[in-house]
Image (cartoon, grey):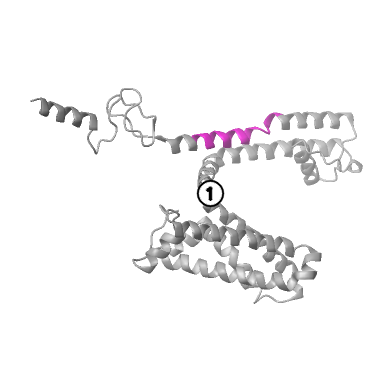
Amino acid sequence: MTHEFKPGGKGLRTRAFQIIFESDTPLAKGFDITLMAVILTSVLVVMLDSVESWNAAHGNLFYWLEWGFTIVFTIELAVRIYCLDKPLRYLKSFYGVVDVIAVLPTWLLLVLPGAQTLVVVRLLRILRIFRVLRLMQFVGEAQLLLDALKRSSRPIFLFLFSIFMLVTIFASVMYVIESAESGFTSIPTAIYWAIVSLTTVGYGDIVPATPLGQAITVMLMLTGYSIIAVPTGVFSAQVIRSLREDRYSDEACPGCGHDRHDRGAKYCLKCGTWLDEETSDPRTLNRDDKGQTDK
């Protein structure tokens, strides 16, 4: 994230930025490890609090632990905003939104009414689970996966749209063929059956009774087997592309024009030409020095 955000000033703000947003110093690494431990512990507390027996026995402890985590995350978010030159840009980013979600539910519980908003309160408590998404910022490969998802979003969307049209057609045909006694009471219900059949899950709550309906079901299941690997292949191709771009440099060789070099490579793989045009080839310098010595 250091390439996306910059410190908002010198002195304390720069020091805080280096600790929070970078990880190349022992203090910054210690901060990251501590924050990961706190995030995992807070998620564990939310999970245990959802168990009725644990909530009855340790509900008060969970309550104060949750407030402790909220205060820690609120202070951390405030420091992040303080040390950035463009804090609003960070708040609009993925990790900024996750940071806000991590602290907002507990503070909202202070201003919400009581029993009549029980469902809302439960929803806000579950939102704390999203803290685990913050762990992605500590994994370097997470950005690679996000880039692959962005690149494959359009073909995957086209694939899902085609699947939606396919299941709608199959569902409409089955709604006409099968009776309501078989479970096909409406087209939306038939769409649910078509999705379950296409994904080869087969819950068995809606089953066609006619031979023609059973034949269509077989066709739909076979279709599901044949196309289920399509989005996986698209995403895998984008991941491989991202890996290659991360490994290889786009800079072409000034000698032969070859552009598939490892990042950090000094000489061309094909012709051996020195690649760094900003500095001189040490082999040439050594030969010049040797020639001058011989003279």
Residue type pointed to by label 1: Val
Q: Residues within 10 Å of mark 1 (few under 14, many from 20)?
A: few
Residue 247, above or below 104: above
Q: Which residue is mark 1?
A: 139
Nearer to the camera, 125 or 166: 125
Determine the residue located farthest toward the right in the rendered image. Answer: 181
Q: Is residue 235 magenta?
A: yes
Residue 14, above or below 241: below
Instruction: Tell me the quarter of the image containing the C terminus.
Output: top left
Mark 1 element type: loop
Residue at x 50% of width, y 59% of height: 30
Residue at x 85% of width, y 31% of height: 214
- The image shows residue 164 at horizontal and vertical percentages of 69, 40
Q: Is residue 139 magenta?
A: no
Q: Which residues are magenta?
A: 226-241
Determine the residue located farthest toward the top in the rendered image. Answer: 271
